[in-house]
Amino acid sequence: MAGERFSNRWGLILATLGMAVGTGNIWRFPRVAASNGGGSFLVAWVVFLLLWSVPLMIVEFSFGKRSRLGTVGAFVKLAGRRWAWMGAWVAVCATAIMCYYSVVAGWCLRYLGLSLSGGLAGSDPQAAWDGFAAQPIAVFFHLLAMGLATAVVFFGVRGIEKVARVLIPTLFCLVIVLAIRAVTLPGAEAGLAFLFTPHWGDLADPRLWLEALTQNAWDTGAGWGLILTYAIYMRVREDVPLNAFLIGFGNNSMSLLAGIMVLCTVFAINPAAQAEIVGAGNEGLTFIWMPQLFGAMPGGAFFMILFFLALSFAALTSLISMLELATRVLIDSGLPRRAALGVVAGLGFGVGIPSALSMSVFQNQDWVWGVGLILSGLFFAIAALLHGVERLRKDTINDGSGDLVLGRWWTVCIALLVPVEAVVLMVWWLYQARGWDPETWLDPLQPFSVGTVLVQWAVVLAILCLANGWLVRRLATDRESRRTEVPS
Amino acid sequence: MTSLGWITMVVICGFVWGGFGWFITWAIGAERRKSRGDGSSS
């Protein structure tokens, strides 16, 4: 297992695109773009693709390629032994998301099954959603999603590559077909106008830029540790910057297609309710409104199957990468893959059960660890600074094996822009949360309070800082055992 | 849709989708050069 590699560049690209393209591209991007000025938002969104997502993806690729270790080992190897806790934070954050993301993948599978069986036809989508979400049956579909992802990760990087080679091209084809269908509906032009018409005055609003930065932080997968994990298995003579650009642009291409697909459908089928639909939240848009819209569309039953198939593929390929991240960290600490995967899958299923049974728990975890991802991005930038950003650029990225030479602009991004962006974004989100409920904003028992974020982060960070030495020793012990296993 | 909307759509979609296509083409060319250069891709 130690010498596992993707068979070629396309295996790595497809697996990493599968990680990056998730439900956030399909159910969050269209809503956020529509709610924040359409064309003006898209300008800011493209700017932060280049000033947040791609620079952090390059850091992650270079860490994985250089260290050939998971997040904890990579931070120890590149930043130093005192910083294992930062790598562990990245792993904990992504793993916490994995626990409830499996629930989301289960929802998608359930709705795929319902659309295939015709179970959504003629039923009240609100009643169907209320009868499923936060009910015991959601636990079964959470188990099903976790089981499918575990079966793939069981076969290691070759299993991940084989699945990505089928699912990702299919996912792109499905979304292209759905987008073409949406733009050819009568009245779809109003959706395009809503998405693309800019209001230049909106660009003076800091909120638009912060929303655009947030969308990049949450839907490209940059700074999550997932790209680092797949980069462990990249070939020795593999390019870093070109792959990062390819994945960043590929992910945002999918978001743009999803935006066209969703907004054209909304404006063509039910333009009167567009404000309500866009404001219905991720689950409301996807599981309550989309079935109604497809139900009113000619041939809608068929296109609804394609929609939920695309959503299921997007969710599963992202879940697989999260499972591999945590598994890889345990493998680095000395566990065989099967045992490590068993621990992670069991833990993920168990910890995810409360999120499957309660929307409050689900939304709380999404809030706490969603903001936590921004801290993960900051930790990557700090680790690169501790290693030396220029040193990383010259020795690891521009090492002669690349097809695209990375310029000094990247050094400025990582040393200056990304840390500033991360701090501003975290402060903005927490400041916003203070205003959501001024009386209980510090109460850790409130699902969307600042207090719940700070308490959960503090507990995890305290444990990880105290365990820093142990984390380093586990890595060292494993390396020692590997040396003794190698025949002389 | 206004002409400004059409222009923005062409610019944004052209940049994002065109960029994706351009990087894919670049990567295909790079892979071909590598396989010709050393006969091995790993």
Image (cartoon, rainbow, N blue to C red):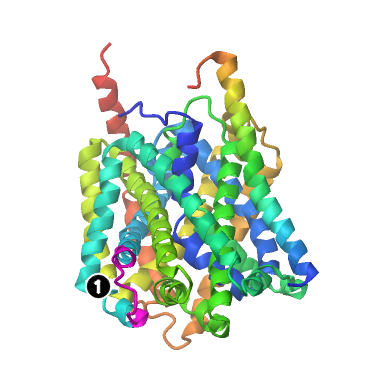
Residue at the spot 41% in from the left edge and 66% down from the top edge = A304
Q: Is residue A33 above or below residue A396?
A: below
Which residue sits furthest right?
A: B3
Could one spot residue A458 in this view of the protein?
A: yes
Provide residue A259's location: percent of width, then percent of height: 57, 64
| Residue A473 picture quarter | top left
> Residue A208, how many percent across, how many down?
65, 70
Is A119 part of what is drawn in magenta? yes
Residue at 42 percent across and 43 percent down: it is: A82
Q: Residue at x 52, y 51 (%)?
A: A222
Residue A32 painted magenta: no
Q: Which residues are magenta?
A: A113-126
Left or right position of A221 against A145: right
| Percent of width and height locating residue A267 | 58, 76
Residue at the far top: name it. A488
Front residue of A387 and A200: A200
- Whole-percent x, y for residue A177 in the image: 52, 56
Subunit bearing disc 1: A
| Looking at the image, residue B18 lies above or below residue A350 | above
Q: Residue at position x 62%, y 22% from top?
A: B33
- Quadrant containing the C terminus of chain A is top left
The outermost residue toward the front is A298
Label 1 belongs to which residue?
A: A357
Residue A422 seen anywhere in this rendered image of the structure: no
Q: Nearer the viewer, residue B8 or A386?
A: B8
In the displayed structure image, the side of residue B23 where residue A429 appears, left or right: left
**Mark 1 residue element:** helix
Which three-letter amino acid code belongs to the residue tagged 1? Leu
Q: Which image quadrant: the N terminus of chain A?
A: top left
Q: Is residue A446 left or right of residue A343?
A: right
Q: Does A474 sit left or right of A286 as displayed? A: left
Q: Residues within 10 Å of mark 1 (few under 14, many from 20)?
A: some
